[in-house]
Amino acid sequence: MGFVVAVDGPAGSGKGTITKRIAEEMKLTSIDTGAMYRSVTLAMLEKNIKVEELDKIKNLLDQIKIEFKKSGNEQKIYLNDKDVSIEIRSKEVNENVSQVSAIDIVRSKMVELQRIIAQNIDVIMEGRDIGTNVFPNADVKIYLDATPEERARRRFKQNEENGINIPFEEILENVKQRDFIDSTRKNAPLKKAEDAIYIDSSNMTIEEVVNEIKQIIIQKKQ
Ligand code: DC
């Protein structure tokens, strides 16, 4: 196992942006585990498989191929050899991903894949259960938080930049709903690992958060 930095936190806490920046600056491979749950959700939507249809889900998981590939500075996610990096951010996926990621067999398959990915490389892995469940012995554990309103504001801005038009109130409602499902599910709910460092980014710039985490990693490596 290489060096592992686990970054957990709710939707819109800035994990994605911050993880990618730190990965570039510190020569780590960034792994967005939410994108993996989103890919499974997309595959289920495409095949019209419902969350109760466990046999069909099991079949799907046996055949599914999820890979990360670097394209320039960007990391793309491939579902069965197709680049789905944009599709997994759709409204339909947003509305279904929490339910899909609460399914036990989906989680165990994704956790297995996440552990395989990190076998021989140094990673910064972001998600909800990385420090608590996937890598309980991670070298560095961060729990990144922000208020629901601030997180919804960030998503709204991000969407605007990508030409996606979803009203702020709808985003805020979706953020709160996902917080509730993610933190109350039975299997590996979203919560801070006891030994994780808590960072509230509500009033911090990206730069400030990146620098704080970089210092923590540097200290740990010394
Ligand atoms: O980070 P994100 O919004 O792209 O994550 C999408 C969903 O995936 C989120 O609602 C919870 C789930 N998820 C999870 O259950 N465990 C992870 N390690 C990562 C994401």
Image: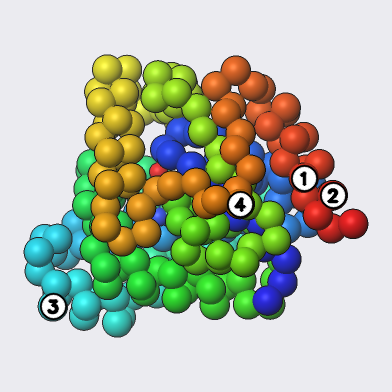
Q: Is residue 70 left or right of residue 41?
A: right
Q: Would residue 157 appear left or right of 178 to someone viewing this image?
A: right
Q: Return the residue at label 2.
A: 219
Q: Which mark is residue 133?
A: none
User: SS of the residue at dot 1?
Assistant: helix
Answer with mark 4 or mark 3, whichever residue precedes in sequence: 3
Q: Which residue is mark 4?
A: 195
Mark 2 or mark 4: whose residue is earlier in sequence: 4
- Residue type at mark 2 is Gln
Label 3: which secondary element? helix
Q: Which mark is residue 55?
A: 3
N-terminal-most mark, 1 or 4: 4
The reply to whether callout 2 and callout 1 are in contact (CB within 8 Å) is yes
- Residue 33, position in %: x, y? 47, 57
Name the residue that disc number 1 marks: 216
- Marks 1/4 in contact by CB < 8 Å: the verdict is no
The residue that appears at 25% across and 26% down in the rendered structure is: 173
